Structure formats: C-alpha cells, structure tokens
Image (cartoon, rainbow, N blue to C red):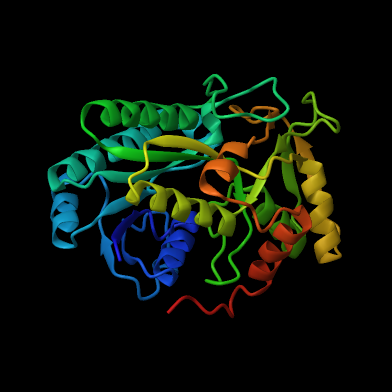
Amino acid sequence: MPKILVTGGAGYIGSITAHLLARRGYGVVVVDDLSRGHQHNIGSLPFEKLNVVDTPALVGLLSLEHVDAVVHFAAYLSVGESVAKPELYFSNNVGGTLSLLNAMAKAQVKHLVFSSSAAVYGTQELPSIPEDAPFAPVSPYGETKLMVENVLRSLDRYSGLRSIALRYFNACGSDPESGLGEEHEPETHLIPLLLKAVVTGNPITIFGDDYDTQDGTCIRDYVHVADLAEAHLLALEKLLGGGASDAFNVGTGVGHSVLQVLRAIEEVTGRTVPYEMGPRRAGDPAVLVANSDKLQRVLGWKPRFADLVDIVETAWQFEKNKGKREYPK
C-alpha cells in the first residue's frame, strides 16, 4: 500500500484522518511540531516531530520513508487570531506550505491533498456555495488558504504536482472509531465551547445577534470530522489513481445558526446553556453553507452524520469521557 505523510497529524482533523488511513491499510507517517497538536492523538503511528518550515528535514523524511503522497493539515486555524496576528498566519500557513512544496519537489513526491477552507469564499449572497463561487475572503486566515490554492494551481500547470483542495465548512464532533475529538488550546470552535459552558456553568459569549439571518446569529454548515476524514481518503485515492487536480467543498448542505446549535446542545445534554450576547467578531461572514454536490458526484462522498443532534451527541460523549479517555494505540 502507498505511504502517506500527514502533516499536522497530531491535531484534530489530521489525527483522525491519519488513523483512518492506517485502518484502511495505508502506511502513515505523522509530522507535527506539537505546538498546537497533542502527542496522545498519534498513538503508535510513526511520528517525526518537526515544523514544516524545515525544508531539509522534510526532504530527508520524504525520501527515507519513500512517501507517495502528502495530506497537509499543518496550519493555524483561528479566524479571530488571524485578524489580530496576520503576520503569524501568513508566515505559518503560506510559508510552511511553500517549504513543504519545495521539499516535495526535491523528493519527487507528486500528490498532495490540501486542507483548505470555506473561508476562501468570504460573504456570499447564495443559499449554498458551489466551488465556482467567487473568492472573497474576509480574514487573513481565508487569504492564506486562497494563496496556497493559487500556488497549487500554478504547480499543477508548470511542475506536474497533482493536488486536491478540500474546502471545509465547520468541522465538528468526535470520531467514534479513534475516540478522538476537539482539544484546541485555546478552544475557538462553537460546539466544544457550548459544551464547556454546560459543564462549568460559565456563560459563553455569542458574537453578534444582528446579522441578516432568521435569529440574528451566524449560520454555518456543520460537517462531522469522521466525514471530513473520509473525504480526504477519497481525494487521496483519486490522485493516486491518476486523477487530475481539483477542489471540492466538504459540508452537509444544511446551515444552522449559533442559537440552533445551542438548542441542539440543550436537547442532547438535557441542560441549559448559559450564554451572553457580545459584539460581532471581526472576519465572520453571516452565512456559510456548502454545496457539496460535486464531491458527492465525483468522489462518491456522502456524510454519515448529517443530523446536527447526532453530531452533537458524539461531541458530548467525548466531553463526558475527558479524564478517562482511552487514546489510540
């Protein structure tokens, strides 16, 4: 079976994808500097602690392990932080990816699955966003993802690198098979923050209730992390089978507002979520919902966790098991 390098493989989506690849028989090598990932997420998978800006080390690893393809997750992901520290995001997300691409060229690795984002679209006036919607990122985070996609399009044309960019909408939930879930420090994602408010009793701040939506709060497409991992596997198989470079949205096609997610949390936990309203957060579009028809048609992907309550239930199980969790072997 092919050997796959997973950068950022100690993080949330990266680790769950790495374990899925291993379960499906692929050779897997994880690269992470552990600045934002967790060693315990890796389990017994082969692991190299390094930052992707270290091009020579990457060249050596790619060559030594005879890597056939790379799945690239190693990036910072907070919209709010990117607005406050744009230089950090351009340096890490764009600079780190350029280092990886240089290393792949030197080691003659020609296949890449890239962790992109719906943030490349910014604010759209569409009920759901197709892949050919205009790019209009409204945060440095979104800009970094678009920059990398532009680089990948050039490399496809001029150097023969074949890549697939997966534009995630809102990743969430925990993976029942690996037992892994969200453990960001600090946590910025809505569902774990709502669950934390339930557990601690400390109110969560909801950023903005004056958007042009049904209840005034932001609407997002929440896609389960196990379904995201499956999309990476399908994209990888397409490339390894000789497929062309492409880009796909990954989402359920259904949007939920912040307050709707809050009500789902209350339904699953049987508890009231304490919250308070705050001002809008810089860089947040009002609505982001995927049109994932292309992914379903071309790669045969279909979400297993399409219901918000089912997604929240997996996240709640992960939250309840903190302190007694069994990590992957």
Nearer to the camera, 134 or 260? 134
Note whether 292 is above or below 45 in the view shown: above
Query: Quadrant of residue 207 in the image?
Result: top right
Q: Position of residue 72 (x, y in %)?
A: 36, 48
For the point 53% across and 51% down, the residue is 186
Note whether 275 is above or below 212 in the view shown: below
Note whether 117 is above or below 228 in the view shown: above
Q: Position of residue 313 (x, y in %)?
A: 73, 64
Image position of 213 (left or right of 248): right
For the point 70% across and 58% down, the residue is 311
Query: Quadrant of residue 309 in the image?
Result: bottom right
Nearer to the camera, 152 or 190? 152
The tally of labels here is 0
Q: Position of residue 61 (x, y in %)?
A: 18, 57
Query: Quadrant of residue 289 in the image?
Result: top right
| Res 172 visible | yes
Note whether 112 is above or below 125 in the view shown: below
Nearer to the camera, 67 or 207? 67
| Res 185 visible | no
Quadrant in which the N terminus is drawn? bottom left
For the point 29% across and 61% down, the residue is 2
Nearer to the camera, 313 or 236? 236
Quadrant in which the C terminus is drawn? bottom left
Q: Position of residue 147 (x, y in %)?
A: 38, 27
For the point 66% across and 58% down, the residue is 304
